[in-house]
Image (cartoon, helix red, strand yellow):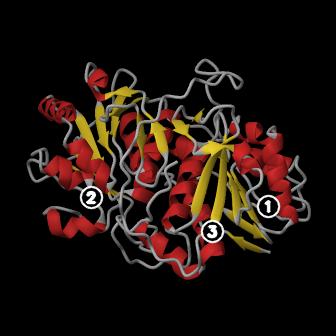
Amino acid sequence: MKSISPPVSLSTPKFLLPIFTSPSQSPPFIVAAAAQPRKAPASRRSSRSIKTPTPTPTLEPVTTPPIEASTPNKKVLVPIGFGTEEMEAVIMVDVLRRAGAEVTLASVEPELEVEASGGTRLVADTLISACCHQVFDLIALPGGMPGSVRLRDCEILKNIMSKQAEEKRLYGAICAAPAVTLLPWGLLKRKQSTCHPAFMGKLPAFRAVKTNIQVSGELTTSRGPGTSFQFAITLVEQLFGEAVAKEIGEVLLLNGHDEDPRKQEFNEVEWSLDHTPQVLIPIANGSEEIEVVTIIDILRRAKVNVVVASVEKSAVILGSKGVKIVADKLIDSAAESMYDLIILPGGEVGVQRLHKSRTLKKLLKEQESAGRTFGAMCSSLPIILQKQGLLKQAKKSAAHPSIATSKLDDVPNGARVVVDGKLITSKGLSTAIEFGLAIVSKFFGHARARSVAEGLVFEYPRN
């Protein structure tokens, strides 16, 4: 049994080196706040009432070369249900697919479309019933409430998971799932484990460990959304070895530069408003799902009104690693409203598709002319903001290391998030958590951001 207990920080995996590689090095995808996890709003949807899935369009695959794994592909099952924590589910799927795993996202509900705990709607690859007779190298449970209860009450999943443990194959759980799902199934017997701080009291006291990652034989457990990257990288190491885990960590920007500032701010201005902030997040086929889901989740935890708009003909988009996300509306409908902040997620193919949207281009121009706030992550900075002439007056910005030195002139060295007046930018991928918290801090102040971070189990400065 081993316990991995670094500080809750994105630079924690000890085997990661400060080397950056392009985010395009990823496998072809498989088509397919508070101090505790928050419950999905009952007014939006009851735990027994599932919306009719939005029809999934035919989408063109994103062709990017895989990172070569030293062993054949491994099969992984990630089950989800109503109220699953979206950050945990999507980060696991994204990271494991980057490593070369064949990941199946399976719904325990009667339908494929599942509304997660923060309101993000995901479309699973298949129903859990289709997984009954398959053998998986790893089964990993995301947390969230009531998502963990929905997983616990699924008899099919219980049988699959029990067989996995009996045959001593890898299994794991994060957040509420160790205490709410695995414990009642009897799958924590003689195992040390951890979970979200709000549920630690449910674990057997003599085997509960207050650590970010706990590995006990075939079982790996973790604490919450803020430790999801550590959790996923640990699972990659178990499946493919340390070398692959290190390489994936470098791509995700899980680097060892502890001396690099999380955030730098220039030309400071107030973002505070006399109303609930209205934020638009446009998405497209090929958008980076880690960035999309993380920003949505964090902002909604802070009680920001977030509108997710598709620039495609359908509300369903296919992310860069094959996760299907259902937007709230199409971009033409979203354009009828005004937004305090427009955020552009990354993803090489997705950014190009956002850039081609005439409606979005008009929205961004109006946003800049009216002096309202906008921001970008990863490659959306040079491809959209710079090409559309929105980086004026020598704005300082952050971008993915693979493009920062070649396409931008004024990038502060090392900062993961940069705020310059009413422009906020980030390097992308794993920096999405810090990006989201920086926005919360600008809108509501440090105390609100720290409260959200505590619910995520993410280390955040006290001052």
Q: Measuring 59% from the left and 79% from the top, which residue is drawn there?
A: 71
The residue located at (70%, 66%) in the rendering is 137
Q: Nearer the viewer, mark 3 or mark 2?
A: 3
Q: Nearer the viewer, residue 401 or 462?
A: 401
Give left or right: position of 78 versus 359.
right
Pinpoint residue 287: horizontal percent, then vertical percent.
36, 48
Name the spot of residue 156 as percent of width and height, x first. Answer: 80, 44
Bin the neighbour count of mark 3 within 10 Å (Cα to Cα): few under 14, some 14-19, many 20 and up: some
- Indicate whether 436 appears above or below 412: above
Task: Examine the rendering and report whether any part of residue 423 can be seen.
Answer: no
Q: Label 2: which residue?
A: 398
The CA distance from mark 2 to mark 1 is: 38 Å
Check whether the beta carbons of the residues at disc 3 and disc 2 lie within 8 A of each other: no
* Distance between the alpha carbons at the discs numbered 1 and 3: 24 Å
Q: Amino acid at mark 1?
A: Ser
Dot 1: element = loop
- Which element carries disc 3, helix, strand or loop? loop
Give the residue number, with chain letter if any, for mark 1.
193
Q: Is residue 89 visible?
A: yes
Q: Quadrant of the N terminus?
A: bottom right
First in sequence, mark 2 or 1: give its number. Answer: 1
| Mark closer to the chain start, 1 or 3 | 3
Q: Quadrant of residue 273?
A: top left
What residue is shown at x 85% (from left), y 55% (from top)? Answer: 162
> Is residue 20 left or right of 14 when viewed as pictured?
left
